[in-house]
Image: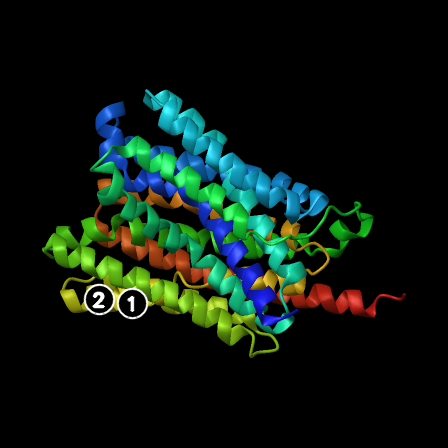
Amino acid sequence: MSEQSAWRVGAGAVAITTSTVLPVFLLGASAVQVGAELGFDPASLGLLVAAYFGVSALMSLPVGRAVERFGSRVTSRVAVLGAAVAMLLTAVVARSLTTLTVILLCSAWCNVMGQLSSNLTLARSMPAHRLGLSFGVKQASVPLATLLAGLAVPALALTVGWRWSYVCAAALALAALAVASRGSAARAAESGADTDRATTALAVIGAAAGLGAGACTGLGIFLVASAVDRGVPPGIAGLVLTMGSIVGLVMRVLLGWHADRRSGGHITVVAGCLLVGALGLVLLALPGTVALVLGVVLGFGLGWSWPGLLQFAVVRLNPEAPAAATAVVQVGVYAGGFLGPVGFGLVVGTVSFTAAWLLAAVAMVLAGVLALLGRRMLVAHRARRVLQPA
């Protein structure tokens, strides 16, 4: 594959992933304007977003099988069209919280399918020496979607209205079809694919991803409120959050770039990121601006930089069915996105921010330990396969 073709594949994966995750991030960014018209508060928003990720967790395995069966060429485009339709419906039809909830939850499969079809495209089409970097760049699409949603607020929501921001986002999603790569075609069902996957090991790694994702969710949602509760001015707290997002984005790309220069040990690096990230969460439990800045750098820069590297490692270890394998891990990630905000908020409400950050740090340590255990199980599984007689 030429460099130009590789860039086309990578750009298409980023465009597909970004456009299919836009509905939920656009709602979060425009929550003040949408809530004022439809009549819901931040607590309702938190429950709605948590429910979105809960539905995503339930959809991950069946969608993963569909992506493997029908190929990324079809499923990536179906996911984008679904997200565009959901955003248009939100702009035109959503006149109450109930309608908004139905539309958002019914669009959750678009995000799942967009993620998994992009994984399959990269696994089947990207050159091996660019695969790690491509997964790192693809996972940078999540903060990119956050950035686009944030820009939509002053540019559209505060000028012509939040409904037009959804219309423009739908048009942007449809434009992603123009840069989407051809992807992989449908494949006949392979009876040996499921038996070749180390499902138990992947479930352990998925549990690690869930704990890590649940712990890190608090960084984006509760960091500013926690800092302000400690006496940090809101402006500085917001700047620290922006800095953490940039550090996290850069580290996702760097981890992917460095993965292409190693022959293995990727899940071990993921575990290391989680364990060091736990130290950052402990620092967030301490008072002072210095502890806040260091905690955000370690928490975002390492504790939340591993998703792309983990997906790359799972694809490398399961080349027969990359979408289905990463779907098992994504169940954990989405479950963490569901349980993390709810659990963190409950601890803050009943105890304190300090207790919530310390509990999140414990969860991240457990995530690192489970990642190492899952890697050991995967290595043992591969060794057994090699020793099996032909």
Q: Quadrant of residue 165?
A: top left
> Which residue bears the numbered disc 2?
293
Residue 354: horizontal and vertical position, in percent? 22, 54
**Quadrant assignment, res 121:** bottom right
Going 55% across and 68% down the picture, which residue do you hit?
132
Q: How many marks?
A: 2
Closer to us: 34 or 271: 34
User: Which image quadrant for residue 364?
Assistant: bottom left
User: Real-space Cα distance between discs 1 and 2?
Assistant: 6 Å
The answer to whether mark 1 and mark 2 are in CB contact below 8 A is: yes
Q: Residue at horizontal 35%, vertical 33%?
A: 47
Check the image and report above or below for 82 versus 89.
Answer: below
Q: Secondary structure at mark 1?
A: helix
Q: Position of residue 85 (x, y in %)?
A: 48, 31
* x and y, in percent, of residue 36 in the image: 21, 28
The answer to whether residue 378 is visible is yes
Residue 297: give its label: 1
Q: Residue furthest right?
A: 390
Relative horizontal placement of residue 323, taking residue 24 as reference (left or right): right
Residue type beneath disc 1 = Val
Mark 1 neighbour density, 10 Å: few (under 14) some (14–19) many (20 or more): many
Q: Amino acid at mark 2?
A: Val
Image quadrant occupied by the C terminus = bottom right
Could you say where residue 53 lies in the image, as x and y percent from the top left?
Answer: 45, 40
- Asked if residue 287 lies left or right of residue 185, the reply is left
How many residues crowd mark 2 within 10 Å: few (<14), some (14–19), many (20+)?
some
Horizontally, residue 38 falls left or right of residue 216, namely: left
